[in-house]
Amino acid sequence: MTSARVRDDAGQAFPIYITVVAGLLFLALAYLAVGQAAGTRNEAQTAADAAALAAALETRDHLADQWLDNVLEPDSWQDIFEGRVSVPNACWRAEELAARNDASVDCAPDGLLGYTVSAETNDTVGDTIVPGTEDQKATESATAVIEARCSPKPPAEGAGDDALPSLTCEGGEDWDLNPDDLSDLPKPEDLFDVHLADS
């Protein structure tokens, strides 16, 4: 009698065991699907961030080149620092970098000194237990901005008509510019800061 009852209890426990195992397996697959989707979104965000920064850095370099070309014309400096000069659209750099990150982008200038990029992954989420997700791609966006790090300070009184303003830059760095010796000039990263805008 006792052995029959034990066999009967064991028989009743087996379906519960199977149900619990199946439930745990389903949860594991669901977590895997969420992880795949999160991974794909991270890839898209990385591509968007890198592409926006690449476009902004390209424009920063053009602005720095214009400043170097006009270093003896200080009246033009402020326009350059504020982006109120003609520079080529650098979205091609965003597209180039996104392709390296296996993504495609839509890129557009954002004001005078920024770029906004929307990146879509070329890869899909892949096969998961969630129907309809296997062909889904991830899309994320980012904006990169360029900010001048320096401001011109008028030359000292009596310095002469050909004297150049000095540059006062963030971080306490000053540049005293001598028109007769322009061998030591600020680099692009000294003149401009490039960073992702806060979302």
Image (spheres, rainbow, N blue to C red):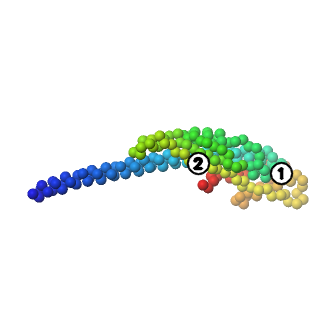
Task: Determine the secondary structure under disc 2.
Answer: strand
Position of 190 with respect to 47 (left or right) is right
Mark with earlier residue (1, 2): 1
Determine crowd level at label 2: few under 14, some 14-19, many 20+ residues with C-alpha closer than 10 A. many
Question: Which is more toward the observer, 49 or 130?
Answer: 130
Q: Quadrant of residue 8?
A: bottom left
Which quadrant is the N terminus positioned in? bottom left
Residue type, label 2:
Ser
Question: Which is more toward the observer, 117 or 177?
Answer: 117
Residue at the image point whose x is 41% and y is 48% from the top: 32
Q: Which mark is residue 148?
A: none
At which x and y percent is residue 152? 79, 56
Residue at the limit of the structure toward the left, as seen here: 1
Which quadrant is the C terminus positioned in? bottom right
Question: Which is more toward the observer, 32 or 93?
Answer: 32
Viewer can see residue 178? no
Labels 1 & 2 near each other (Cβ < 8 A):
no
Determine crowd level at label 1: few under 14, some 14-19, many 20+ residues with C-alpha closer than 10 A. few
Residue type, label 1:
Asp
Viewer can see residue 13? yes
Task: Determine the secondary structure under disc 1.
Answer: helix
The residue singled out by tag 1 in the image is: 75
Position of 162 with respect to 100 (left or right) is right
Residue at the image point whose x is 57% and y is 40% from the top: 104
At which x and y percent is residue 185? 76, 50
At which x and y percent is residue 137? 51, 43
At which x and y percent is residue 52? 62, 46
Position of 104 with respect to 181 (left or right) is left
Residue at the image point whose x is 67% and y is 48% from the top: 110
Question: Which is more toward the observer, 98 or 139?
Answer: 139
The residue singled out by tag 2 in the image is: 141
